[in-house]
Image (cartoon, rainbow, N blue to C red):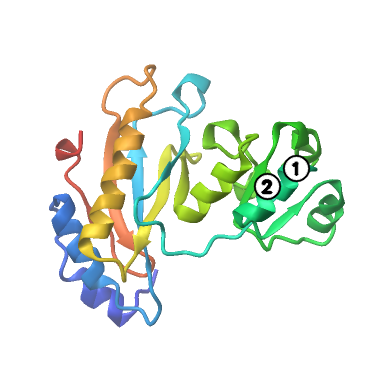
């Protein structure tokens, strides 16, 4: 893969054979984020889980203290009082059955997170094939299937992110933007890593966190010292 001059210059500041502590990693990743837009700072966490087993799955959500720096559009499936509650809480889109053909047939995906009340999951379930692959299917573990739609929408707007294993047992999550201060990124990082450590499945044997890499959207990865995180 051919890399641009900006990436190659940034890569020279990082020793690929070294593992860094959190503060050093944040400093290196921020300085390497030289794109003309505000790059997202991400974590890629390789775990010792085997996601093929239900008792080794990881899925949850956490509210980052300083948010993600991204404006999130929320779609809520609800009716009656709960629909009105979602609108007051600030959800961009609220509806029910009438939204199915719009999403299914017209390919409408102008939203980032989907919340649903439990009584609407029969309706939402019909969208499983289109929402599932995009990671948009509401889930009780992530707090997106709930009767407390006010809290769900408020938390998402405040910077709630979902974490889950991908098919290769890696967790990919944002912790903020390159424009954040180092202190803000450190707070977000610690909140997230604490939640993931707490979510360790009891069935996992051996090393839980195999590697943790921090990177910006266009920058090189920086490996963290995993031993200092546990």
Nearer to me, 143 or 39: 143
Q: Is residue 74 left or right of residue 10?
A: right
Image coords of residue 156 (percent x, y): 52, 50
Apparent side of residue 227 relative to residue 147 in the rendered image (left or right): left
Does the rendering let one see residue 78? Answer: no
Q: Which residue is mark 1?
A: 81
Could you tell whether 179 is left or right of 71 in the image? left
- Considering every residue shown, the one lying at the far top of the view is 203
58 relative to 100 in the view: left or right: left
Depth check, front residue: 2 or 89: 89
User: Where the N terminus falls, by quadrant?
Assistant: bottom left
Q: Is residue 21 visible?
A: yes
Mark 2, secondary structure of its residue: helix
Q: Position of residue 68 (x, y in %)?
A: 41, 59
Q: Quadrant of the C terminus?
A: top left
Quadrant in which residue 116 is drawn: top right
Q: Is residue 67 above or below residue 63?
A: below
Task: Check the image and report above or below for 153 versus 16.
Answer: above
**Spatial separation of the CA atoms under disc 2 and disc 1:** 6 Å
Disc ID at residue 21:
none
Residue picked out by circle 2: 85
Residue at (82%, 53%) from the top-left corner? 99
Query: Mark 1 Cα within 10 Å, few/some/many (few <14, many 20+)?
Result: few
Q: Residue 205: which quarter of the image?
A: top left
| Residue located at (87% from left, 51% from top) | 98
Are the two marked residues, 2 and 1, in contact with CB atoms closer than 8 angstroms? yes
Q: Which residue corresponds to the image point at 44% horizontal and 53% vertical from the top-left?
A: 159
Q: x, y (%) of residue 137?
A: 65, 42
Q: Nearer the viewer, residue 230 or 149?
A: 149
């Amino acid at each position: 893969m051919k890399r641009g001059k900006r990436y190659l210059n940034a890569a020279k500041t990082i020793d690929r054979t070294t593992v860094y502590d959190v503060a050093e990693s944040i400093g290196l990743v921020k300085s390497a984020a030289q794109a003309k837009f505000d790059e997202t700072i991400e974590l890629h966490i390789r775990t010792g889980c085997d996601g093929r087993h239900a008792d080794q799955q990881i899925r949850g959500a956490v509210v980052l203290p300083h948010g993600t720096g991204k404006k999130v559009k929320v779609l809520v499936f609800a009716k009656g009082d709960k629909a009105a509650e979602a609108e007051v809480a600030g959800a961009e889109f609220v509806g029910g059955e009438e939204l199915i053909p719009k999403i299914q047939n017209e390919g409408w995906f102008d939203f980032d997170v989907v919340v649903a009340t439990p009584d609407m999951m029969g309706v939402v379930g019909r969208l499983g094939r289109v929402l599932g692959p995009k990671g948009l299917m509401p889930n009780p573990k992530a707090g997106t299937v709930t009767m407390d739609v006010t809290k769900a929408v408020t938390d998402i707007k405040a910077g709630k992110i979902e974490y889950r294993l991908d098919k290769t047992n890696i967790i990919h999550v944002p912790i903020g933007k390159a424009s954040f201060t180092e202190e803000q990124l450190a707070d977000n990082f610690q909140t997230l890593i604490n939640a993931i450590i707490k979510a360790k499945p009891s069935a996992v044997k051996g090393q839980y966190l195999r590697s943790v890499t921090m990177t910006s959207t266009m920058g090189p990865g920086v490996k963290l010292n995993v031993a200092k995180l546990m």
